Image: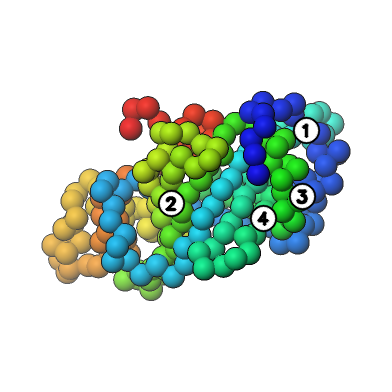
Amino acid sequence: MALEKFNQPVLKISNEPILSEVLEGTGDTGKEIEIERKYLIPELDTTDLDVFRTAKITQRYLPAIFVNPKTKKDEEITFRLRKWDAVGSDVPVFFVQYKKVVPGGSINTRLEYKKLVTEEEFNKLWNKGVGRAVTKTRQYVEHKGASGREYEIHIDHYEEGEFGHKSMAGRTTVEVEFKSPEDEVFFSEQVAIISQNGPTVFSVAKPPMEADVPEWMFKAQDMTKDKRFKNSSFAKNGWPVSE
């Protein structure tokens, strides 16, 4: 891969069969619902966490134009190009992805359209993207809360990488994936309660309660609605200057 240009002309989806397949949900992996929230955790130490998988991820963004079948007008949407390389594996996986908010759902509930592509197909699209790349090492952690609800937590350790912003080096974010909107509300409300009342709020309750939020996330700051912390913003602007 290389970054030959940062500002390519916007593609037309009708001229790119792979993008058409992704948008129509007819790619190899089709589409699935994703519900997640993003957090910052000061001075996070993952040494003692039970990590079940680690992967090196490099991704870039690809704007493209399509004709909306309802309005008959051109609209611009953005695809994500992602190389996913599991630690311990010699075979990286290449994806083209597109996400959109589920109609009637929260902004954190999105439909993800995804297609596996060859390295050659990936590289051709890669050099049509805009902005810099985002490079990170992702740790995967499974967590079962006191309520019995199960969560998958992704800890992303960013680096400048070959094509990224220097400001990304050493930064970390945490994403929590939920199995249902109800689980998301339950978990996020607990994060807010702990943030407002301190880490002992559940243990001193009468009767004492246990939180679904793992102890290592008690200092979590919810950044889900802050667009500066979206990966697409990291690719364009790097880490927010004020942080």
Q: Residue at x 44, y 70 (%)?
A: 52
Q: Which residue is mark 1?
A: 11
Could you say where residue 219 lies in the image, as x and y percent from the top left? Answer: 25, 50
The amino acid type, in three-letter code, at marker 2 is: Asp
Could you say where residue 212 lies in the image, as x and y percent from the top left? Answer: 32, 64
Q: Are marks 2 and 3 in contact (CB under 8 Å)?
A: no
Q: Residues within 10 Å of mark 2 (few under 14, many from 20)?
A: many
Q: Is residue 172 above or below residue 138?
A: above
Write down the quadrant of residue 62 in the picture. Answer: top right
Q: Earlier in the sequence, mark 4 or mark 3?
A: 4
Could you say where residue 140 lies in the image, as x and y percent from the top left? Answer: 45, 63
Write down the quadrant of residue 45 in the picture. Answer: bottom left
Q: 105 or 162, which is in the foreground?
A: 162
Mark 2 → mark 1, Cα distance in angstroms: 30 Å
Q: Quadrant of the C terminus?
A: top left
Q: Secondary structure at mark 2?
A: strand
Mark 2 → mark 4, Cα distance in angstroms: 18 Å
Q: Residues within 10 Å of mark 1 (few under 14, many from 20)?
A: some
Does residue 148 show up?
yes
The amino acid type, in three-letter code, at marker 1 is: Leu
Q: Which residue is mark 4?
A: 94
Could you say where residue 169 lies in the image, as x and y percent from the top left? Answer: 40, 40
Q: Residues within 10 Å of mark 4 (few under 14, many from 20)?
A: many
Q: 89 or 57, which is in the foreground?
A: 89
Q: Which residue is mark 2?
A: 156
Q: Are marks 4 and 3 in contact (CB under 8 Å)?
A: yes
